[in-house]
Image (cartoon, helix red, strand yellow):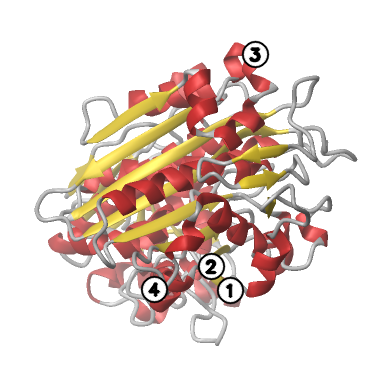
Amino acid sequence: MAGGNGGMGVPEIVFTTQLQGTLLKFDGVILVTNTTDKLSGDLQCLKIPLSQYKSIDASVEQEVVLVHAPDLPGARVIFAPTGPLDRDYDDVRRFSDAAVIGIKRALKAGMVKPILVCPPEELFKEASLVTLLGALHALYVPLEIREAHPEKATKVDCLGVWASSEEEGKKLVLLSSALERGRTVCRDIGGSDPERMAAPNVADYVQSIFNNSVVSVSVTSDLTTIENSYPCLAAVNRCAKDVKRHQARVVVLEYIGEGANDKTLLLVGKGVTYDTGGADIKAGGIMAGMHRDKCGAAAVAGFFQVLSILKPKGIKVIGAMAMVRNSVGSDCYVADELITSRAQRRIRVGNTDAEGRMAMVDLLCYMKEKAIEEYVPNHFELFTIATLTGHAIRAVGCNYSIIMDNGPAHGAKTAQELQAAGDQVADPFEISTIRRDDYDFHKGKSEYEEILQCNNQPSSGTSRGHQSPAAFLIMGSGLDKHGRESEKPLRYSHIDIAGSSGPFPGIPTGSPVVALTAKYVLNRI
């Protein structure tokens, strides 16, 4: 039996390869699978009590049940069935969904040291990891509660997991611990209220998390520097800057893995700590929940937490968190203003509620400059990650990230590969395409401006409302000069997590931290 240390509200995770004899410290078993027929070998001991129960309740493989099992720790086993797994539309999320239900039932039963069991699954090779991550999601304790009531920092004393071998057990503990700590950082920043995670507090939190780690952190707080270096971000910050606790921060993180570097990721995350809509105010009761508009930047920080633990080799990652509040008042930026971006593009503001693209565009230009300065063909991959548009939810629903590539990234199949990686680990993506219509939409409409920031309608009511902002980011940052026909093409992908970031009210998901890890990290540790 071995385990990984808990922390940040993440319970200690321990594994065992034997269900009987060494499980005395656990007080109940949670079984996640689709049928008891898969219980063989060491798991045969689970089949006996479940078979006996099945003789009096035929729904045992359809609904969660708590069964008396005198020969097992705690004398009880919870069976949380996944349901069918072989239909065209079934995917690995069946395991995480079942784990969430199972762990909630365990908490109601009073378990404080449960152990998860997920038998080997041929259809989904990462089923055990996904099951463990599902349980950990249900065990997250919000930051505000952990700070106010340290005694409530965890919902369980420890979380066990059965593994078929020592090697698998060590891998499960390592990966689940790293991923959950990364998702915890993401949830802490993204889910905390707009005062607890106002921009200066986010910067302090990030610096604290990565103190004495392999991740370096630099914070820009000087208002003049922000105005000169990130003029579009400064426009959004203009109203908030007079309230000291709301002033913008640019947080830059850097990780350099051991060995020869054959890949550099450049990530920009939208960190709007609260979005009133600005002068184009969110009216009619749609402002509630806008503290979640920082989940893109939160995901960037969460990914770096994973990097700091797993320490992948041969990769360099730079992340920028654009932390700003879109306040409304006498000094807020307004539609019709002309603002010159870092890339020296004249931008006409069309809608102050399209502040996310404004917050990110200059930082994307900054990342582009870094890539050009150290240019190596096919080496750099740039991303923006944001809860950017309501249109994304309208288009694909509430459980999916949307990724879209520029020309060079499309040629490299970045979107397809990230989608495939996400499918393996229950962090799913849909793919959209940036079309010529999207560039035309953002072309200046008069001699005054080169680029139109947005129309004056909500994205959810605008055709191609989640695709066109990617075109704006490309144009406003100058990345349009680095397409596939250029001398120095750069791969760029935009990820809209408006749907996948999590429900409100509710707990943020941490997406797309797990998918990014699956694609860029797991093969380097």
Q: Tell me how far mark 2 sits from mark 1, CA to CA.
A: 5 Å
Whichever of callouts 1 and 4 sits on the residue coming sooner in the sequence is 4
Residue 512 place in picture, x, y as percent: 46, 55
> Pointer 4 and pointer 2: residues touching (CB < 8 Å)?
no
Q: Tell me how far mark 3 sits from mark 1, CA to CA.
A: 40 Å
Disc 2 secondary structure class:
strand
Q: Which amino acid does label 2 sit on?
A: Met
What residue is pinned by disc 3? 243
Q: Tell which tag, 4 or 2, sits nearer the viewer.
A: 2
Whichever of callouts 4 and 3 sits on the residue coming sooner in the sequence is 3
Q: Which residue lies furthest to the front in this view?
A: 447
Name the residue at 38% across, 56% down: 132
Q: Tell which tag, 4 or 3, sits nearer the viewer.
A: 3
Dot label at residue 404 = 2
Disc 4 secondary structure class:
helix
Mark 1 surroundings within 10 Å by alpha-carbon count, few (fewer than 14), some (14 through 19), many (20 or more): some
Name the residue at 66% across, 38% down: 339
The image shows residue 168, relative to residue 320, as above or below, that is below
